[in-house]
Image (spheres, rainbow, N blue to C red):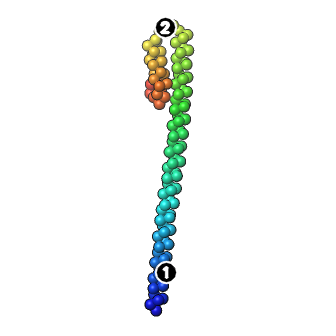
Amino acid sequence: MQALKEKLQDMSASHNAKVHAREEEKVEKDLAKARAEVAHEVRKAKEAEAEMELHMAKAGKRAQKEIEKHTSDQNQPPNASVATATAAAAAAAAANPRNLTNNLL
């Protein structure tokens, strides 16, 4: 009778250990999945930021070309101060493309 009781206790302990191990594996698996999702979102954010910087640089170059085209067509336009301010904003935008919209507004 004692041997049977010990065997049942051992089986119960073994079962509890397996359940605990499964729970730990599930937690580790969920953590790994969360890390992968975070890494994926970070990668997407970096790609979007790089793409935005590329577009901002292109916009800065186009703005600079447009300013140069208008300033080369006219020696001294009536609104020279506006053209100078716009040229300065475009130069600043070329240096830091993130501030293009702020500089031109």
Residue 68, image x, y percentages = 53, 15
Q: Which residue is mark 1?
A: 11
Of 4 and 26, the residue lying toward us? 4
> Where is residue 13 drawn, in percent x and y?
46, 78
What residue sits 48% from the left and 84% below the top? Answer: 8
Q: Residue at x 48, y 18 (%)?
A: 87
- Mark 2 or 1: in front is 1
**Mark 1 surroundings: few (<14), some (14-19) or many (≥20) residues within 10 A:** few
Dot 1: element:
helix
Query: Which residue is tagged 2?
Result: 76
Q: Which dot marks residue 59?
A: none
Task: Answer yes or no: is residue 105 visible.
Answer: no
The outermost residue toward the top is 75
CB of mark 2 within 8 Å of CB of mark 1? no
Near mark 2 (Cα within 10 A), the count class, few <14, some 14-19 or many ≥20, is few
Q: Which type of secondary structure does the marked residue at label 2 adopt? A: loop
- Residue flagged by tag 1: what amino acid is it? Met
In the image, residue 13 sits, relative to residue 87, either above or below, namely: below
Task: Look at 47% across and 75% down and name the residue there.
Answer: 16
The picture quadrant where one finds residue 2 is bottom left
Looking at the picture, tell me which residue is in the foreground, 40 or 100.
40
Against 19, is 88 above or below? above
